[in-house]
Image (cartoon, rainbow, N blue to C red):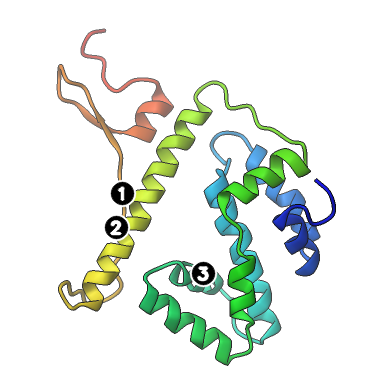
Amino acid sequence: MSEYGCKVCRVLDEYDMERYEEQLLEQWQADSSQRKGYRKLSEWFNTLMLRREMDRAGLSTLGDEAESKYERLQSDEAIAAEVATELANTGVPIEQLRDDFVSYGVIRTHLKECLESDVDLSSGEWERDAIDISRNHAETKITEAVRSLRNKEQLTAGGDVTVSVTVELECENCHARVPADRSIRRGYVCRCNN
């Protein structure tokens, strides 16, 4: 694509993040156990932008502070507005930053068209990605619902609540239930007919 025909290209230049383009490509083309899908890459990329702006504003980015703020910016409106206001009050240009956040589709376009790269999705890669994307989407939606219930005081907890979604596969013959990632890694759900 031409100069700034791609949002990622523009953001890389404007945020002085060109050095991260190679890491973006490496994470996409890593072996199957380390490879990140487009959604994870867009979250990683957007968090980098947020971390950079938080650093510029003198805010702490130790630990997972930027990741936490980014996650809350993606949550329900009340929490996102509170975090955005907090960041804006400390000098982070949050409205511009949120406009510059990229979607997974923009990341995909950048990798495939701007970098003219591809990844071999043979031998079960696309299937694993589909499971991961679905699980991550379910976790995100459930997390949003739980936050909303907590905000409405219809659900209480002593501390933060973490949502975890596990995909399990079950054999209809013997009813063995196994986490999907373990089944895929070992190549079988059960051995009842072997």
Q: Is residue 182 above or below residue 73?
A: above
Question: Looking at the picture, which amino acid does disc 2 mark?
Answer: Ile
Q: Is residue 22 above or below residue 127?
A: below
- Looking at the image, can residue 161 be seen? yes
Q: Residue 70: which numbered mark, if any? A: 3
Nearer the observer, 170 or 143? 143
Q: Residue 17: which numbered mark, if any? A: none
Q: Which residue position is annotated with label 2?
A: 142
Residue 96 % position (x, y): 64, 75
Q: Residue furthest bottom?
A: 89
Instruction: Give the quarter of the image for residue 18.
Output: bottom right
Q: Is residue 123 above or below residue 134?
A: above
Q: Residues within 10 Å of mark 2 (few under 14, many from 20)?
A: some
Residue 152 % position (x, y): 20, 77
Quadrant in the picture for the C terminus: top left
Calculate the distance from the C-alpha at mark 3 to the C-alpha at mark 1.
Answer: 20 Å
- Looking at the image, can residue 163 be seen? no
Mark toward the viewer: 3 or 1: 3
Q: Is residue 106 above or below residue 98?
A: above
Q: Which residue position is annotated with label 1?
A: 165
Question: Looking at the picture, which amino acid does disc 3 mark?
Answer: Tyr
Instruction: Give the quarter of the image for residue 99.
Output: bottom right
Nearer the observer, 68 or 146? 146
Calculate the distance from the C-alpha at mark 2 to the C-alpha at mark 1.
Answer: 9 Å
